[in-house]
Image (spheres, rainbow, N blue to C red):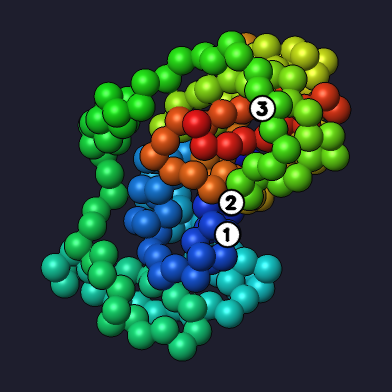
């Protein structure tokens, strides 16, 4: 399974667990805006078609062809069983262009000013990020959430991971699923899907516990 497959699967699971209706355009645009990855609508459309009979993904979901783009074309709508497809409201959206995605990210960066935080702060509870076996936080960094989330290099070095190493995903505490294969990048950072955490449109704190668990919280 490729990294693109992992990103699409994780995003689809986010929509399914939220009991949302969606088309391939919803998934593709979410990935472009919130994951910091570029996956074309056609690629998402093909992936959904190939996997739509997978009960681990679409159990409890139906599909129906609907008119979109002012009735000029049709698209496959994925919806929870029993939902009325007529209530799906985003029929006239289109796949975002690179320029549109860049504009969204630029706007977001004007609102949330990224920058490292050098102050560590002990915590005993965190919002829906998972519960560490040792709650003592030894490092805290602040990152922008408008790109695909990247665990900062100094935290990765502190854990002892090196470029090319396979990452023990059980050490990364997130609310959503992570790709099965994670590796340390050449720059000592680890990249994970934006959909793996609960918070959108805001900066995030990345925290390291004494037993080398990585956690997230809203900054």
Q: Position of residue 61 (x, y in %)?
A: 53, 77
User: Marks 2 and 1, Cα distance to the nearest angstrom?
Assistant: 5 Å
Q: Position of residue 70 (x, y in %)?
A: 14, 68
The residue at 59%/20% (across/down) is 141
Give the label on residue 207, or none.
3
User: Marks 3 and 1, Cα distance to the nearest angstrom?
Assistant: 25 Å
The residue at 46%/88% (across/down) is 82
Q: Earlier in the sequence, mark 3 or mark 2?
A: 2
Residue under numbered circle 2: 10
Q: Position of residue 191 (x, y in %)?
A: 60, 29
Q: Is residue 98 visible?
A: no
Residue under numbered circle 1: 13
Q: Earlier in the sequence, mark 3 or mark 1?
A: 1
The residue at 78%/34% (across/down) is 135
Check contact, mark 2 vs mark 1: CB within 8 A. yes
The residue at 28%/82% (across/down) is 86
> Counting other residues with Cα less than 10 Å from the Cα at mark 2, is it few (<14), some (14-19), or many (20 or more)?
many
- Secondary structure type for disc 3: strand
Going by the image, does 73 lie left or right of 195? left
């Amino acid at each position: 399974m490729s990294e693109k497959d992992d990103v699409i699967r994780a995003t689809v699971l986010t929509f399914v667990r939220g009991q949302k209706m969606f088309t391939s355009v919803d998934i593709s645009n979410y990935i472009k805006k919130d994951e910091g990855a570029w996956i074309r609508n056609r690629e998402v459309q093909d992936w959904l078609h190939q996997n739509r009979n997978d009960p681990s993904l679409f159990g409890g979901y139906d599909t129906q062809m609907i008119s979109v783009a002012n009735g000029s074309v049709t698209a496959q709508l994925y919806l929870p069983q029993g939902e009325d497809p007529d209530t799906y409201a985003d029929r006239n959206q289109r796949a975002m262009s690179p320029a549109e995605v860049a504009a969204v990210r630029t706007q977001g960066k004007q609102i949330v000013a990224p920058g490292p935080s050098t102050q560590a702060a002990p915590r005993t509870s965190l919002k829906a990020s998972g519960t560490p076996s040792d709650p003592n936080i030894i490092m805290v960094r602040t990152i922008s959430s408008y790109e695909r989330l990247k665990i900062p290099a100094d935290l990765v070095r502190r854990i002892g991971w090196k470029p090319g190493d396979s990452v023990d995903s059980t050490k990364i505490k997130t609310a959503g699923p992570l790709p099965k294969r994670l590796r340390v990048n050449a720059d000592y950072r680890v990249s994970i899907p934006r959909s793996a955490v609960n918070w959108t449109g805001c900066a995030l704190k990345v925290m390291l516990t004494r037993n080398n668990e990585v956690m997230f919280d809203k900054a």
